[in-house]
Image (cartoon, rainbow, N blue to C red):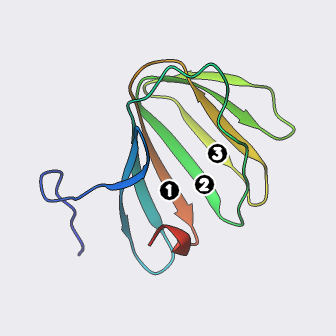
Amino acid sequence: MAVLRENDAKPTKVKEGVQRKLLHGENLMMVVIDFDNGPWDEPDIPHHHVHEQTTYVAEGEIIFFCEGEPDEMLKKGDLFFVPSGKEHTIRLLTRRVRLIDSFNPIRKDFL
């Protein structure tokens, strides 16, 4: 069994104000992504990938945008799903946001 302890995990800096930690097996990946650079005036640049994605909002508030769906204001405790290939993004509404993403298959570009 693989374990990643909060105090032992070294985050990877994605960009200024954004860092992530991850754990994965052969087909499933979980990523904790912390933002401390909000709120944002505009959404992040939309993107898409082949991976299915589920996300849990562990802290803060965001607006979630997903191709073909209405924009959703989400807060701590809410979840969202992104199908494979759908363009999506977020906009931070609070200074700090923590998202917990799960991907299948794993995001090799994150390793």
Q: Specify the label residue 53 is tagged with.
A: 2
Question: Which badge, 2 or 1, comes first in the chain's sequence?
Answer: 2
Crowdedness near tag 3: few (<14), some (14–19) or many (≥20) residues, C-alpha within 10 Å: few
Residue kind at label 1, given as amino acid type: Ser
Q: In which quarter of the image is residue 48?
A: bottom right
**Residue farthest front in this picture:** 16
Q: Which residue is painted at 65% across and 64% down in the image?
A: 51
Q: Are marks 2 and 1 in contact (CB under 8 Å)?
A: yes
The quarter of the picture where the N terminus appears is bottom left
Determine whether label 3 and label 1 are within 8 Å by CB. no
How far across and down, in percent of the image, does residue 69 sit?
82, 34
Which numbered disc flags the more N-terminal residue, 2 or 3? 2
Q: Residues within 10 Å of mark 2 (few under 14, many from 20)?
A: some
Residue position for label 3 = 81
In the displayed structure, would residue 91 be above or below residue 79? above
* Quadrant (top left/top right/bottom left/bottom right) for the C terminus: bottom left
Residue 59 x/y as whole percent: 38, 28
Task: Give me the residue at 41% from left, 20% from top.
Answer: 95
Q: Return the residue at label 1.
A: 102
State the residue at coordinates (80%, 26%). 70
Q: What residue type is labelled 3?
A: Phe
CB under 8 Å between callouts 2 and 3?
Answer: yes
Q: Dot 3 lies on which element?
A: strand
Amino acid identity at mark 2: Gln
Q: Residue furthest left?
A: 7
Image-based side of 66 in relation to 59, left or right: right
Locate residue 66, reporting x and y percent: 76, 39
> Where is 46 relative to 4, above or below?
above
Give the spatial CA distance, label 3 vs label 1: 10 Å
Q: Nearer the viewer, residue 102 or 42?
A: 42
First reached walking from the N terminus: tag 3 or tag 1: 3
Q: What element carries label 1?
A: strand
